Every structure is written in C-alpha cells, then in structure tokens.
Image: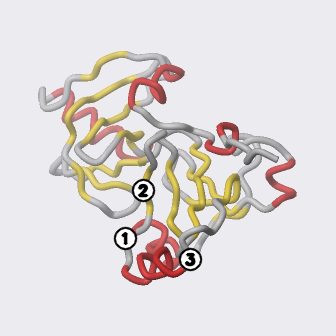
Amino acid sequence: MDDIVRQALAKWPNVPHCYGWLGLDRRGQWYMRDDRVQAAGPFAVSKGALLRHDKLIEFIGRNYDHDERGQWFFQNGPQRVYVELEVAPYVWRVAADFAVTAHTGRAAQPRRTVVDEGGRLYLDTDIGFGLVHSLDVQIAADAIEQGLWTPETMRAGELPQRFGYACSPATLRQEPAA
C-alpha cells in the first residue's frame, strides 16, 4: 500500500466505503461505473467506462487488497472502493518461461490449476486466485502438457466459495441500521 494511502487512513479513519463504482473484467481491465451504469445492471451486463490512464491503473494495482469476507477493494486514500469482479480477483499473465504475473503487475507462484465446465483455466497462487488471460492459454496449455501444472475440474459457480472471494460486494453490502 502506498504511504500516502496509509497517511490518509490515519487522518480520516471513518470514511464510508464505496460500492459498485469499480469493476475488473476477465481480461484484467478496470472500469468506472457511475450511477447510470450501475442502474443498467450488474457488472457482467453493464461494465461502464474503461480506465486508460496508466498512472491511475498502477495506483489501483498497488492498493488492491481484500477484506476478511473475501471482498476485493482498491484503497483510495481513506476510502475502500469495493470491486465488482466479472470472474475472479486476479487475471494472470503467463510468460513463455511459465512465470505468472497478476494484472496488477505482482509476481505469483502457482500452487493449483483449475479448469471449469466452460474450459476456462484458473490458477490458485501464493497471492490469490485468478483466471488465466485468454491470450496466455496456449502457454498455460504447454505447462500442462509438460506436467508442470495438473488441472482439477470444478464448476465455475463453486469457485468463489471454494477460493474465498466475492464477485459482487455491492450485493453483499450491509446497510447501516437506521
């Protein structure tokens, strides 16, 4: 986490959390979702505006984390901006040497390989669970063929509970008592 974020947390500890305004798609791209976009439907249906500002994307990546309920968020100064996930908390890029890097730029070590009923490939790593980027499936298939990774079959609907993440913190949001 950036020092400036830690300082803001200390200065303003009780800023309300933000839900529904940020999404992560299956290709590791971030989307801003205003009120109109949120009203149009869940993230998989109504994504919003693709973020293209490199410095903002890097800032989000450095301050991306999860809480005890498996809800992923971007710590934006004193405010947690909970993330709507299209598929999983991470999107993995796989290099020719089978090195794995998250969409946030963070390196990871695979521990487990999963394939769902739709043929999507996932990795459970030392930093978390995520989907292999579609452009890197061939390289990942080479790792499987070489016996480096052995996929287990699981249903996509079971993955959030099995690997401890929430795809939509907005739907889990607990309203404060009146």
The front one of 31 and 135 is 31
Residue on which disc 1 sits? 1
Q: Position of residue 5 (x, y in %)?
A: 45, 77
Which disc is residue 12 wearing?
A: 3
Q: Residue furthest left?
A: 147
Q: Residue at x 68, y 45 (%)?
A: 170
The front one of 39 and 19 is 19
Q: Nearer the viewer, mark 1 or mark 3?
A: 3
* Element assignment for label 1: loop
* Element assignment for label 3: loop
Q: Residue furthest front?
A: 178
Residue on which disc 2 sits? 65
Quarter of the figure with residue 104: bottom left
Q: Residues within 10 Å of mark 1 (few under 14, many from 20)?
A: some
* Element assignment for label 2: strand
Residue type at numbered disc 1? Met
Q: Is residue 165 above or below residue 102?
A: above
In this rendering, position of residue 149 left or right of residue 55: left
Nearer-N-terminus badge (2/1): 1
Q: CA distance from mark 2 to mark 1?
A: 9 Å
Q: CA distance from mark 1 to mark 3?
A: 16 Å
In this rendering, position of residue 88 left or right of residue 113: right
Nearer-N-terminus badge (1/3): 1
Residue type at numbered disc 3? Trp
Nearer-N-terminus badge (3/2): 3
Q: Residue at x 56, y 62 (%)?
A: 80
Q: Position of residue 127 (x, y in %)?
A: 28, 48
**Contact? badges 2 and 1 (CB < 8 Å):** yes
